[in-house]
Image: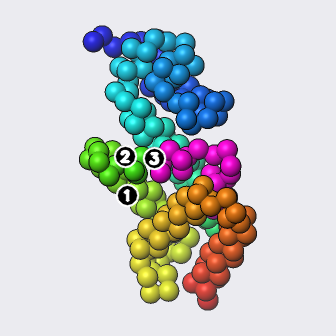
Amino acid sequence: MAKPNVVTKEQLIEAAKRCIVEKGIHSLTLKSVAEGAGVTQGTVYYHFRSKDQLMLEIVESMCTSAWHSLESMSKQEGENTHWIQAALHSAHDRTTKDAYFHKLLASLIVTGFTNEQIRQKLEKLFQFENQVLKEQMAAVLGDHELHGVSLEVWSVLFNALIDGLAIQALVAENTDIDGLYHHLHLLVNKLLEASRA
């Protein structure tokens, strides 16, 4: 199959995001992405062999973009604790009713139970997130432990906490996500203050 040069993979990912925002996650198909991008379905199939692959690449795109943005912000700020607050704020934003990141992620996790390729890609994505978070925590704390626990373990725990809160908010409509994030901010601030004492 000849490589189509009408549209890039990134443009198709953006078209897929628009489709989700405008029509909902349930309407995401390779056909709807083709229509949204104004290309043939064959062009979309050239870049994405399945809807699962498309969903995975949307999640990877959003995740790496967010982490790289936060990472570059930390280098500009001078005071790295702003990065932590921005990261928590970004995570909180992804739990709004119309946010779709964790809906896609949860669907992919379920698919990963029976699709080894998806599971391996998610594993690499989580490892990437944990590594970036560990590096940012090290830049803030300058230490490799926080209250006797390695930053590697803290990064995994914080990532699991953030994803767990988002999934709980998706499933349990009465989850007070604003209250939970308020207390999470307090907890993180207390941990940071205690680490400097």
Give the magenta part as a residue range.
88-106
Q: Quadrant of residue 52?
A: top left
Amino acid type shown at disc 2: Thr
Front: mark 2 or 1: 2
Secondary structure at numbered mark 3: helix
Residue 99, how many percent across, how many down?
Answer: 63, 46
Which numbered tag is attached to residue 127?
Answer: 1
Total labels: the figure holds 3
Q: Is residue 111 visible?
A: yes
Front: mark 3 or 1: 3
Relative to 162, is 110 on the left or the right?
A: left
Amino acid type shown at disc 1: Gln
Label whose residue precedes the other's in the sequence (2 or 1): 2
The residue that disc 3 covers is 107
Q: Are marks 2 and 3 in contact (CB under 8 Å)?
A: yes
The residue that disc 2 covers is 111
Q: Residue at x 53, y 63 (%)?
A: 164
Amino acid type shown at disc 3: Ser
Relative to 86, is 104 on the left or the right?
A: left
Q: Residue at x 62, y 75 (%)?
A: 188
Relative to 179, is 17 on the left or the right?
A: left
Q: Are marks 2 and 1 in contact (CB under 8 Å)?
A: no
Residue 145 magenta-highlighted: no
Label 3 Cα crowd, 10 Å radius (few <14 / some 14-19 / many 20+): few
